[in-house]
């Protein structure tokens, strides 16, 4: 069972009442096929790859109840309607004890007023949230803030899903996406005194097929940092002389270059340099 907990935006938040009826799942693919003259069926323009998904549409229904909230109905209504002007924010939900979030904006709110049914006591809210990226995301060990969490239990915050202080010449790394949807990979490579001039990364399926990968070629010095951010489509060279775009020296080798982790185990192969570098990789588990 899933239940909405909170909508959080810059400068504000809305705490949902105890029970909300929602339609949380995003699974409408945007296929693209073309008829071919004289042939049955058609041409699938995405080949064997997954088609992209449509914009997410999350629907929710809940009740405003002055007996539960202890506030006048007009205040409860005003608070709900303020979400329309909030802009984009995080919608946080509980999926059977597992916290997940999705980036959304409030698209439509309808509050029914039926004076024959004690509208001064209870009113029904129906809302639609639009998600440009229709994926719920989370990480292992995620917790809810503002829900009575104790900070003296040894919990460690921050850090990356994978981190290695010394990778020599290359490596094979296994990353596990615990969700059921593909998720973008964030990679950070920091140069040591070995000053590598070429770095390669490949995403290899169990059968050996490479589905994504890139090569970056440029002389570096110690403490230079290369960032390849698949979620934002960015390549950044954080050089000791300043931050610049890394795109001119970055070449996609397979697909679009940026790595999207598939559900389950993912094999990432690093190669192409001499000496040592430090490598960090981070990502969210993702669900439809």
Image: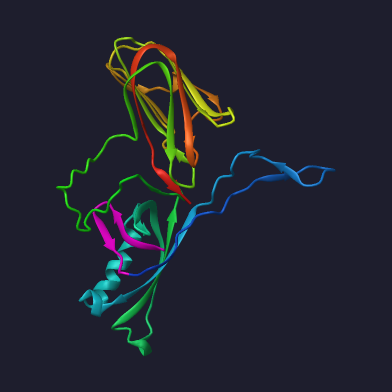
Q: Which colour scheme is used?
A: rainbow
Q: Residue at x 32, y 87 (%)?
A: 118
Q: Residue at x 36, y 52 (%)?
A: 101
Q: Position of residue 26 (x, y in %)?
A: 50, 55
Q: Can residue 234 be seen in this view?
A: yes
Q: Which residue is drawn at 69% across and 45% down?
A: 33
Number of numbered markers = 0
Residue 197 appears left or right of 66: right
Q: Position of residue 51 (x, y in %)?
A: 59, 44
In the foreground, 232 or 209: 209
In the drawing, does residue 27 fall left or right of residue 126? right
Residue at 35% of width from left, 62% of height from top? 4
The x and y percentages for residue 286 are 43, 46
Q: Is residue 55 magenta?
A: no
Q: In which quarter of the image is the N terminus?
A: bottom left
Q: Can residue 250 be seen in this view?
A: no
* Residue 78 sits above or below residue 161 on the image: below
Quadrant for residue 173, please give it: top left
Vertical placement of residue 216 versus 267, above or below: above
Residue 122 lies in what quarter of the image?
A: bottom left
Residue extending farthest right: 38
On whether residue 12 falls in the magenta region, the answer is: yes
**Depth check, front residue: 51 or 272:** 272
Drawn side of residue 278 relative to residue 1, left or right? left
Residue ranking furthest to the left: 152
What main secondary structure does the magenta stretch of the protein show?
strand
Residue placed farthest to the bottom in the image?
116
- Of 264 and 234, which appears nearest the observer? 264
Query: Does residue 52 lie above or below 245 as drawn?
Result: below
> Which residues are drawn in magenta?
1-18
Q: How far across and down, in percent of the image, does residue 109 sit? A: 39, 67
């Amino acid at each position: 069972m899933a239940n909405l907990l909170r909508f959080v935006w810059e400068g504000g938040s809305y705490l949902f009442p105890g029970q909300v009826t929602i339609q949380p799942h995003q699974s409408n693919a945007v296929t693209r096929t073309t008829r071919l003259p004289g042939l049955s069926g058609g041409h699938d323009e995405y080949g064997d790859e997954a088609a992209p998904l449509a914009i997410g549409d999350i629907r929710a229904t809940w009740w405003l109840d002055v007996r539960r909230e202890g506030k006048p109905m007009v205040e409860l209504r005003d608070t709900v309607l303020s979400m329309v002007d909030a802009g984009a924010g995080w919608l946080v939900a509980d999926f059977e004890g597992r916290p997940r979030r999705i980036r959304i904006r409030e698209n439509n709110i309808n509050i029914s007023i039926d004076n024959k049914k004690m509208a001064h006591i209870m009113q029904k809210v129906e809302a639609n949230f639009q998600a440009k990226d229709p994926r719920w995301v989370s990480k292992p060990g995620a917790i809810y803030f503002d829900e009575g969490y104790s900070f003296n239990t040894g919990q460690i915050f921050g850090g990356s899903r994978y981190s290695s202080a010394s990778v020599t010449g290359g490596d094979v790394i296994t990353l596990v996406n615990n969700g059921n949807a593909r998720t973008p990979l964030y990679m950070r490579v920091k140069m040591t005194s070995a000053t590598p001039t070429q770095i390669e990364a490949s995403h290899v399926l169990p059968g050996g097929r490479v589905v994504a990968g890139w090569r970056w070629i440029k002389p570096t010095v110690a403490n230079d940092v290369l960032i390849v951010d698949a979620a934002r489509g960015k390549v950044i060279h954080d050089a000791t002389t300043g931050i610049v775009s890394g795109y001119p020296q970055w070449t996609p080798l397979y697909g679009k270059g940026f790595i999207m982790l598939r559900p389950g185990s993912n094999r990432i192969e690093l190669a192409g340099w001499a000496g040592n570098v430090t490598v960090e990789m981070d990502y969210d588990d993702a669900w439809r």
